[in-house]
Structures are given as C-alpha cells and as structure tokens.
Amino acid sequence: MQTDSFDLTPSQTASHRLSTGWLMLALSALVGAGLVVILIILARTPIIHNLIPWTGSFRTALVIHVDLSVLVWFLSFAGLLASLTLGAQSPLWTGLGKVGLGVALSGTLILTLSPFLGEDAPFMNNYVPVLNNSAFFLGLFLFAGGVLLLTLLTLLNRRPASGHGELSLRFGLLSALLILLLALGLLLWSWFSLRAVTPHDEHYFELLFWGGGHLLQFTHVQLQMLAWLWLGSLAVLPGLPTPRLAIFLFTLGALPALFGPVIHYLYPVESGEYRFAFTDLMIYGGGIASIPLSVMLGWSLWRGGGATTTPEQGSARLALQLSLLLFLFGSVIGAMIQGINVTIPAHYHGAIGSITLAYMGLTYHLLPGFGFRRPSPRWSNIQLVLYSVGSVLHVIGLAWSGGHNVPRKTAGAAQGLQTLADKIPMWVMGLGGMIAVLGGILFLVLAVRSLRQGRVSRV
C-alpha cells in the first residue's frame, strides 16, 4: 500500500472477524429497515393507502425504520471502521470486542421487536424517534452501550498506522468517535436537566435528543468524508487531497461540534434559544468541510475522465460519483426548505442516501479484504445505480410535495392530497422509494451471498 493512499484495511485476521460481525449487524439493520419502509411508502402513496388496512401503524413503522436505517446502520458501520484500527488482539481485548458487538446486537434485536413487546406509543421527535415502552428503551440503551464499549476500545488500543494516508483517515475516524462521545455526554446532560419535566411526551423526547442528535450528525459527516477519500483512492483518482490537507478538513469539520457544550451551558434545554442555536450550528457548521471536499473530489473525478483499469476501480468510482451527486442534490433542497413540510425529509433523505451509497461502495471493497468472494462488479454497479435513481426520484417527489405544503410525518388521508397536482408528486415519491428499496434488497443479496459463500482459501 502506498503511504499516501487512503485506506484502513488491516492484515490481522482477528480484526477481520470482529469487523465482519459489525458488518453483519449493519446489514441486519438494513434488512429490518427495508421491511418496514415498504409499509411507510405504501401508506403515503395515493390510492394505494386506501387499499391497505394498516396505515394506522405508519407512525410505529416510521420510528423503527428511522432508528434502524440511520442510527443502527450508520453507527454499526462506524463500528466496522473502528474495529479495523484495533491493535494487539490479546484475549482481554478480543473478549471485550466480542462483548461490545454482542451487546449491540442484542439491543438491535430488542429494539426491532419492541412494538410487539410493550405499549405501541410512537413519538415522532427528531433524530431518535421513540416508542414509549420499556423494551424499546432497553434495546436503545444496549445498542448505545455496545457502540460505546467499542469506541472506548478503539481509543485505548490502536494498531500503528502504515502510512500517511491511513494516518489521516484514522484522524478522521477518531474525531468522529470523540464527537460521538460528546453527543452521548450532551444526551446525559439533557436528561439530567429535564429530570423534573413531566410527562414524558413527544415534546420531552424532542428536547432530550435535540442537542446530542445535532452533534451526532457531525459524526456522520466526518465518516462520510472518510468514506469519500477511501473510495477516491480505490478509484485511483488523480489530484486527491494530500493526507495533510485531509487532516485539516477533518479538523475543520470537527471544530463546530465543540460549540455544542457551550450552547448547552448558555441556554436552558427548554428554551427557544437552545433549539435555534443548535439549528444554526448545523446549518452553518455541518458543511464547512464536506462541501469543500466534495468540490475537490468532483474536480478529481472530472480530471480523471472515465478511464479505469479494473472493474473494481470502476465500482469505487461509480459509488463516489453517485454519493457526491446525491449529497449535492440534498444540499440544494436543504437550501429550499420553507416551513414544516415534506421538503425537510427530502433534504435529509438526500444526505442519508449519500452516506449509504458511500458505505455500500466500501462494503464491496471490504468483503474481499476480509477474505470473502468479491461481489460481481457488474451487479454491484447495477445495484448502485438502482439505489441512487430510486433515491433521487424519492427525494424529488418529497421536495415537489413540499411545494404543495404536504405535512411531514403523516400518511393516508392526513396528508390532505385533494387534487391530481397534489397526488402526482407523491406517486413519484412512492415509485422512487420502491426502486430504492429494490436497490437496497439487491445490495443485501450481493453482500449476504458473498458472506454465505465463506472465506476464500489463500495459499
């Protein structure tokens, strides 16, 4: 490996086993999220929602979908990346790594089944929507505990970096994990500040997760930039940022998160100033590093033309291209937000889709790195295009409906779709959503098939 190439893949078999476990947890979260998103899409699609009897379960399904597709999928992939950097695999460290993974897996299972294990009381608060039952909170607590344990292991037991490029990615990863710890700290601080607030309704959980939820987005952005740089190296793009510049960008991206505790100290959690300050922090700080990096990578893609020497390089290049395009699309829609309507989920579905595409592209590289058979580059490319086209149509439909002021977090007749002009955008949303689901299913088929074929024997 060249010292300036961006790569985290270790050589230790023990790290591969733990990383594979986190990858399987991430894939399992996508399976669960994909099953419930079908209900969500159908419950929002005109005419079809009148033909199904269970649109009343829309809010519960939305809670589970958001938590699996954003919280569990993203943080499990963060766990995969963190496990790649672990150092000496003594019985103690290996055991603790397995405990963290097992706890996170148990929490995910309980969270997924929680609608059947307690009261069905969904609250649609931002960032971490909840079901107000004990099983859900137990699952959420266990998953967070497993991620926290792996984060601490990563900070305490890191293998030496093999080059400047890996060192810069490790810096980005550690900054993301430290922001994650900061987000968890703000969550505890908010819980302590709100201990006298009753009842525990949707407004309570909105306040509880507001500060920490905003900081968690900085973790996701840092890891997205890491994935972009890694994909750029895999595609052998010319003119990539230097490792030193990458470290500067990771630092720039992390600095706004340091204002989170300051905001929490200055304003009461229940105040409007607290909410507006964190909103401004995300608006003005969220893209401070990712936007410049996306421009640099876009220029590298432009300079590199369409030439690739191997199918694997082509898949990495395609994943990076589509991720950057969806990121740009979501950012433009974010600037168009006016009022509380479905333009808001259009924006964050663009952001979520962009990160997911980057992680999908890395997965195709990591599977053979872990010793499994490489998924077909041809089918990998079909999957990436299918998912991105569906995501773009889904986002267009939501943003278009936002122009008709369709409220967010609603389904069926509650959407107020009266005219054909109101319904057409939501049909586009539904069509795009189902295409994206098919793309997600194909990704899971390719990844699971690679895992089931077992490790490739090497001489």
Image (cartoon, grey):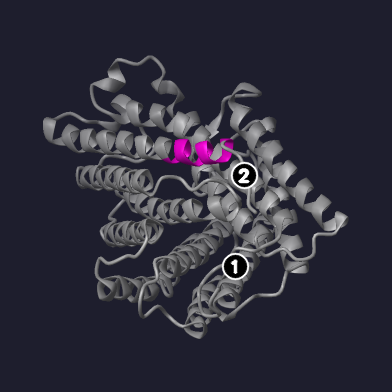
Q: Residue at x 64, y 76 (%)?
A: 162
Helix, strand or loop at disc 2? loop
Direction from residue 1 to residue 404 in the image, left or right: left
Residue 227 lies in magenta, yes or no?
Answer: no
Instruction: Kindly tell me whether residue 378 is visible in this rendering.
Output: yes
Residue 149 percent coordinates (x, y): 75, 55
The correct choice, above or below, for 418 with respect to 292 in the image is above
Look at label 2 and name its amino acid. Answer: Arg
Question: Which one is earlier in the sequence, the residue at label 2 or at label 1?
Answer: 1
Q: Residue furthest left?
A: 420
Residue at x 41%, y 18% (from the top left corner) = 54
- Magenta stretch: dominant SS? helix
Q: Position of residue 131 (x, y in %)?
A: 58, 33
Query: Is 451 within the magenta?
Result: yes
Q: Residue furthest front?
A: 459
- Residue 42 position by quadrant: top left
Q: Which residue position is annotated with label 1? A: 173
In the image, what residue type sits under mark 1? Answer: Leu
Residue under the point 59% across and 56% down: 78
What residue did someone put label 2 on? 455
Tally the numbered discs. 2
Graded by Cα atoms within 10 Å as few (under 14), some (14 to 19) or many (20 or more), the crowding at tag 2 reads some
Splitting the image into 4 quarters, where does residue 376 fall? top left
Looking at the rendering, in which quadrant would you find the N terminus? bottom right
Examine the rendering and report whether any part of residue 63 can be seen: no
Stretch of the chain drawn in magenta: 443-452
Q: Element at badge 1?
A: helix
**Mark closer to the observer (2, 1):** 2
Near-viewer residue (360 or 458): 458
Residue 445 is labelled as: none
